[in-house]
Image (cartoon, rainbow, N blue to C red):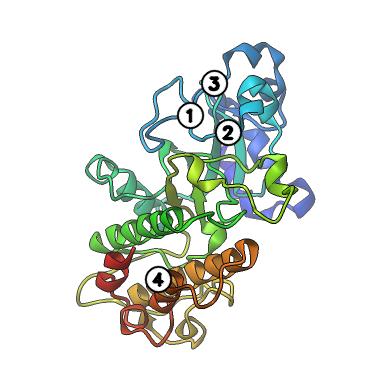
């Protein structure tokens, strides 16, 4: 890849943002990557080689395993999975197939940036081997001149649709996300931008027809039908902190629906407490959708207690502590 191409990465107009990616095709090919929209990606000769089973451990998949669960009809015709209707490439994100014909996301990140340092740390062997690490698996780091490329497993984005179908599944989702957040904080990393689009799970974004068009008043189960895993993505707003330095000012403005109030005050704030607040808002939002979708009554004792955990009046939530939240789920 030429230095000139990289130096112009920020200068492409919206209509031609694909140009720097195409200029890097040889680099990607050398790592076995087939960029979405290129002839290699569309080559029908690959059809017989697509993986036909999901990895039991999606954080450490084998070469013949897909990263995600799929519908039965998609396993029968896996080549049709090249069409991802929800994905939109950008100047800094692009989809590809790896050499084993699994979907990967390539993210272009400025060389030497804090984001890249944090992703490298979370992907280092001691941390990646820890079962509490709920961050998206990284397959390759590809070095450039001014931009590096992080090749990540592609997991589904629509983890909260439909809402979780039973209390055990909902509590397991919350447990994983709380465990993953505490793991990051234990290693001095605050995410800084937690909202539903920065959380993924190991299932495709396709849903059975009966989920979209339930035949009766009783909605069919979905999340409880398989062993799911949750993961965090996007560390562009992440911060490294210490016990003595947890207050940071940030230009990052998470979506207001999920953000902690102090993130809009233009002064330093506790990044750990803000993370816990944002995750609490995400869990509250998913429960609210679940109540409506499955007609869960507001006086349901189990869910009332769960909902209270993420109330702003709860000190564990407001002050960025995990003990009560973790025990509850």
Asked if residue 202 can be seen in this view, the reply is: no
Crowd band around label 4 with a 10 angstrom C-alpha radius: few (<14), some (14–19), many (20+): many
The answer to whether the residues at label 2 and label 4 have Cβ atoms under 8 Å apart is: no
Q: Residue furthest right?
A: 15
Q: CA distance from mark 4 to mark 1?
A: 31 Å
**Does residue 84 show up?**
yes
Query: Do the residues bearing badges 1 and 3 touch, measured as CB atoms within 8 Å?
Result: no
Query: Measured along the vertical axis of the image, is residue 286 above or below residue 71?
Result: below
Q: Is residue 61 left or right of residue 3?
A: left
Cβ–Cβ under 8 Å for marks 1 and 2: yes
Residue 54's disc is 1
Label 4 vs 1, first from the N-terminus: 1
Element carrying mark 4: helix
Residue 160 badge: none
Give the numbered dot on residue 70: 2
Q: Quadrant of residue 185?
A: bottom left
Position of residue 240 measured from the top left corner of the image (x, y, whole percent): 31, 65
| Residue with the mark numbered 4 | 275
Q: Tell me if 245 is positioned left or right of 159 in this view.
A: left
Instruction: Report the residue at 44% width, 50% height from top.
Output: 230
Q: Residue at x 64, y 52 (%)?
A: 219
Does label 4 or label 3 sit earlier along the sequence? 3
Q: Residue 118 or 68: which is nearer the viewer?
A: 68
Badge 2 or badge 4: first in the primary sequence: 2
Question: How far across and down, in percent of the image, does residue 23 sit?
Answer: 65, 34
**Between 159 and 234, the one nearer to me in the picture:** 159
> Could you tell me which secondary element the residue under label 3 belongs to?
loop
């Amino acid at each position: 890849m030429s230095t000139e191409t990289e130096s112009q990465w920020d200068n492409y107009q919206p209509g031609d943002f694909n140009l720097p990616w195409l200029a890097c095709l040889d680099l990607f090919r050398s790592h076995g990557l087939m960029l979405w929209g290129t002839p290699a990606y569309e080559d029908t000769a690959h059809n017989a080689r697509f993986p036909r089973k999901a990895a039991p451990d999606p954080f450490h998949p084998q070469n013949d395993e897909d990263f995600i669960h799929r519908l039965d009809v998609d396993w029968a015709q896996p080549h049709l999975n090249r069409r991802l209707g929800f994905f939109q490439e950008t100047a800094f994100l692009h989809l590809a197939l790896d050499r084993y014909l699994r979907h990967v996301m390539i993210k272009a990140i400025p060389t030497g940036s804090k984001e890249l340092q944090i992703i490298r740390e979370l992907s280092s062997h001691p941390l990646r081997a820890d079962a509490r690490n709920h961050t998206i698996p990284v397959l390759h780091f590809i070095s450039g001149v001014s931009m590096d490329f992080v090749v990540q497993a592609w997991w589904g984005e629509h983890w909260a649709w439909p809402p979780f179908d039973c209390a055990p599944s909902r509590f397991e989702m919350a447990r994983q996300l709380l465990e993953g957040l505490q793991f990051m904080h234990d290693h001095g990393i605050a995410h800084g931008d937690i909202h539903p689009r920065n959380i993924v799970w190991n299932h495709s974004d396709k849903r059975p027809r009966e989920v979209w068009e339930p035949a009766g008043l009783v909605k069919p189960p979905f999340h409880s039908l398989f062993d799911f895993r949750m993961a965090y993505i996007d560390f562009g707003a992440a911060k490294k902190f210490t016990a003595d330095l947890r207050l940071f000012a940030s230009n990052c403005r998470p979506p207001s629906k999920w953000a902690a109030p102090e993130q809009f005050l233009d002064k330093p704030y506790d990044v750990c407490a803000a993370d816990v607040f944002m995750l609490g808002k995400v869990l509250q939002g998913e429960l609210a959708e679940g109540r409506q979708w499955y007609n869960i009554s507001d006086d349901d004792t189990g869910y009332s207690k769960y909902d209270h955990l993420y109330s702003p009046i709860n000190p564990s939530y407001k002050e960025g502590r995990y003990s009560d939240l973790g025990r509850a789920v």
